[in-house]
Image (tube, rainbow, N blue to C red):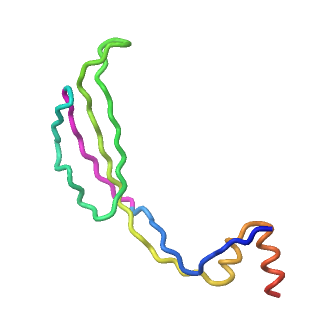
């Protein structure tokens, strides 16, 4: 039987739903930013997608369009009650912990 620690106060990162997209074009390792590369958010995750230009089924031009998406997140402090902490314990630990409490 393993014991599981559940803290009553936690800090979690939650997405706010705010996003911004930035575009960049590259020609043979020479890049041109179409927007400012700096983000307006203080805390954010970055997702990069790149696509090459294809002329035929297996012939690509050395031109790449790169899309950068920044997703803002904020930290939230969560304070649990003892009942919520017991509920977060997994299966076997939950029943033994509840029995010790009673």
Location of residue 68 in the rendering, given as x and y in whole percent from the top left corner: 30, 44
- In the picture, which quadrant includes the C terminus? bottom right
Labels in figure, total: 0
Judged from this view, the residue extending furthest toward the bottom is 102
Location of residue 85 in the rendering, given as x and y in whole percent from the top left corner: 66, 77
Asked if residue 95 lies in the magenta stretch, the reply is no
Q: Is residue 1 above or below residue 78?
A: above
Location of residue 36 in the rendering, given as x and y in whole percent from the top left corner: 16, 50
Q: Is residue 94 above or below residue 34?
A: below
- In the picture, which quadrant includes the N terminus? bottom right
User: Which residue is located at x 69 percent, y 71 percent?
Assistant: 4
Q: Is residue 6 above or below residue 48?
A: below
User: Which residue is located at x 28 percent, y 65 percent?
Assistant: 42
The magenta-colored residue range is: 17-27
Out of 97 and 67, give the one closest to the viewer. Answer: 97
User: Which residue is located at x 65 percent, y 78 percent?
Assistant: 84
Left or right: residue 101 compared with residue 28: right
Quadrant in which residue 2 is drawn = bottom right
The dominant secondary structure in magenta is: strand
Judged from this view, the residue extending furthest toward the front is 2
Left or right: residue 13 compared with residue 25: right
Quadrant in which residue 58 is drawn = top left
Left or right: residue 64 compared with residue 98: left
User: Which residue is located at x 32 percent, y 30 percent?
Assistant: 51
Q: Is residue 66 above or below residue 18?
A: above
Quadrant in which residue 79 is drawn = bottom right
Location of residue 57 in the rendering, given as x and y in whole percent from the top left corner: 38, 12
Out of 48 and 55, give the one closest to the viewer. Answer: 48
Asked if residue 19 lies in the magenta stretch, the reply is yes
């Amino acid at each position: 039987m393993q014991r599981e620690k559940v803290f009553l106060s936690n800090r979690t990162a939650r997405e706010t739903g705010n996003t911004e997209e930035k575009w960049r074009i590259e020609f043979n390792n020479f890049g041109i930013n179409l927007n400012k590369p700096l983000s307006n958010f203080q805390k954010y995750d970055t997702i990069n997608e790149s696509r090459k230009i294809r002329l035929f089924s297996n012939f690509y031009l050395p031109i790449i369009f790169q899309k950068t998406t920044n997703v803002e997140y904020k930290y939230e402090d969560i304070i649990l009650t003892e009942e919520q902490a017991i509920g977060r314990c997994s299966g076997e630990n939950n029943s033994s912990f509840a029995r010790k409490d009673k």
